[in-house]
Every structure is written in C-alpha cells, then in structure tokens.
Image (cartoon, grey):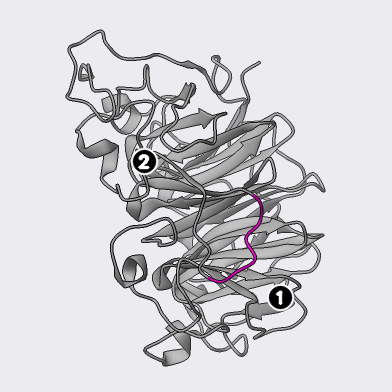
Amino acid sequence: MRASLAHASSFAPIKAPGSAVEGRPLLATDGPRTVLGWRPDDFAVSIRPDASTLFGPRGACLHADGSLWVADTGHHRLLGWRAVPVEDNAPADILIGQPTFEAEGRNGKAEPGAASVNVPTGICAFRDGLAVADAWNHRVLIWLKTPTENNQPADIVLGQKDFASALANEGADRPTATTLHWPYGVAGIDGRLVVCDTGNRRLLVWNDVRESGQGADLVLGQADFTNRDENAGGAVSAMSMRWPHQIASWLGRLAVADAGNNRIMIWNGFPTANGAPCDAVLGQADFAACDHNGATYYPSNRTLNMPYALACHGGQLIVGDTANSRLVGWCDPETGSAADALTGQPDFAAKGDNRWGVATRDSLCWPYGLSVLGGLVAIADSGNNRVLLWEVAR
C-alpha cells in the first residue's frame, strides 16, 4: 500500500499536507517510450544475465552515431545497441566484458584486460568513440571509435600504466595526476575528457587525450594532484567535494553532481586553475551547507538527496536526485534557486522508491545515470534493474 507523502519545503520546517509544490512535468506524462531490462512479473529473470536483462545499471549513453550503450554494472559488462531500441526489452547487439551474454563476474572472472570491466559506471560519447569509468579497476577505458564487435578491446587506458594493472592510485597512499581511485563519472566537453575521480574526492580534466597512462591537466576539488581528503581536508566549501559522480556542460557552464554534499556545483565557464572554486550551488542554500534535503526529512524544489546523475536539454539542467528517486529540472543557475520541473514523484515534497509502491512503468528507484540526445532521455533506473528511454515533456 502506497504511503501518503505530505510535506516539507526546503530551508523551513515541515509544512502541513497540501503545501507541496507540484511543478511542471519534466518528461512526457504518458511514461517512457521504451523500457529495457524489465521483467515486472519475475524479478529473478531480471538479474540473470542474457542479452536483454540488466542488473543495477549505473550508466547510459545515447551516442550521436545512433547507438545506445549501457553500463550493466551488476553484471560487470557493457551492452550496446546499434540503433536506439523502440521495443521493450530488445536484446543488445554488442557485448563487452564477458565471454557470452549469459556470463557474469568481475573482469569476466579473469585478469583485467583491454576488454574487461569491474563495476563499470559512467559511460559517455567521447569524440567518435566511448569513454567508460571502470570504477573498481580504478581506470577509464577509451574506445576511439564506438565498438562494432563483441569484446572489442579499448584503445587507451587512463589511471593505470597499462591494461593489466588495476590498483587504486597504482598502489600508493596518495594520488598523482596519472592515478585514479573509484572513478564513477565521465564526460566529453569540447574535446576535453572530464572524470569524476570519486574515491579521491576530485575532478580531473584531460585537455587532449593521446596515450595510455597520460596525466591529467587540471584538478578540481583539491588544491593539487597529491591530496585526496574529503572536502579537501576542511569544511565543505565552494572548492571542495565529497563524492563527485557525474558531469554536464550547461549553457557554457560546468556542472558537477557532488553527491556526498547533496548539491550540484556550477562554474560559470570552464575553470582553468587547479582548485578553482565554483560560482554557484543547487540543492543547498549556500556553499557551507551539505545536509540532505536541507536537513529535513522531506525534499522540496530547492533540495537534493545524493544526486548522482546530470544531463542537459536546451537551457534546462536535468538532475537525477537519486536517493529521492526522482528527476528534477533547473533553468536558474543561481545558488539556492528552485527547480521547476519534476518526474518520478507527484510533487516536490514527495520521496520514496517507486513512490513507496511497487515498480510501475513511470516510477523511479535510485536513478544513477542520465544521457540526453535530441528530445530523448536515457535513464539508468538502477534500483529497478532497467533503463528507461523517455521523451522530454513538450
């Protein structure tokens, strides 16, 4: 039985039922166009690997070449569709990371290599190919062209000296410009590669990726390349990060989902100096605040709870407000501003996995990854073991 949620405004005491702001629809009100990996009548089927099932997917990529790619995280593999599917549960065409569609296991139950993954998360179009955050191998894999064959090896690895290595920070206690620790998010922005080096609580930027093992050119979230302390070793601030997870370019701004501080960090333009502070935050009233849902139980149109996912459509920033199991849309980049669009919950004061009920076609449970191409949004609806392909509301 679905619970009733009546509810709170941000930065204020919980209000009485009926006070919630509804917001305009973010995505089409008739629900997703296509659902992949979902077997609502048989949960066990959904986690057994085959060409049409998913287990805790955390990343999706709608590629400009017309293909769709999914980081099927729990099955330790990447799935590719040569064309964006239009039928529910369409089987994938391309497999990377396992010997067959029915196999699973970290690195395909073998040693790390150029075609293996261990908890893949973020995935994005990078130039003409793909970049994948291979989180528990502590590396980013890059294909210069989108793969066309099963287990096609990556061309470049970052965060490790070679494809056989897989230690966090190359086995050292402190990071460098060439190492990674649990990278969870990747984005290609104007030819740069931007990586959320989550375990090192920092963002790394490569201005021009040329070869394996190459060092990053810029670090954000830390003062230099050798520190990895939470919030740069101090209180939360305009330059520090706790758990960066995904990146987006929004009308010339750089936006980063700082999930551990329950906020989105925004730079007005692309930063050029190490440790540059951001210019605004969404989800908090100021740079010093970090509590989830503004330190109240219920969310509002100004608060967030562990936002992991970001994408843009036109002038709108779409945020996967993961622990509130909703998507929210912002058009105003000013600190503390209110979101005005919503999908996944009936109003901005509501929360709960699948709206505190069973999964339905249009509900959400811990959305971890987003990708937008044209008017179509791909959502890695991780808690429901599926990917939703959903049109933006018109």
Residue that appears at 31% across and 25% down: 355
The crowding category of the residue bearing disc 1, from other C-alpha atoms within 10 Å (few below 14, some 14 to 19, many at least 20), is some
Magenta segment range? 269-274
Is 272 inside the magenta-drawn segment? yes
Residue 277, how many percent across, how many down? 49, 59
User: Would residue 157 be visible to someone looking at this image?
Assistant: yes
Query: Residue at coordinates 50% horizontally, 81% vertically from top-left?
Result: 225
Mark 2–mark 1 Cα distance, whole angstroms, equals 32 Å
In the figure, residue 344 lies in which quadrant? top left
> Dot 2, how many residues are within 10 Å of its Cα: few (below 14), some (14-19), or many (20+)?
few
Image quadrant in which the C terminus is located: top right
Residue at x 40%, y 61% (from the top left corner): 241
Disc 1 marks a residue whose amino acid type is Pro
Q: What is the number of callouts on the image?
A: 2
Query: In the rendered image, which quarter is residue 164 located in?
Result: bottom right
Q: Tell me the number on the disc at residue 153.
A: 1
Name the foreground residue: 388 vs 51.
388
Helix or strand or loop: what does disc 2 sit on? helix
The x, y position of residue 93, in whole percent, is 71, 52
Q: Quadrant of the N terminus?
A: top left
Above or below — where is 341 with respect to 201?
above
User: Marks 2 and 1: which is nearer the front?
Assistant: 1
Residue nearest the viewer, comparing 138 with 12: 12
Q: Which residue is mark 2?
A: 43
Element class at badge 1: loop
Say if residue 105 shows up in the picture: no
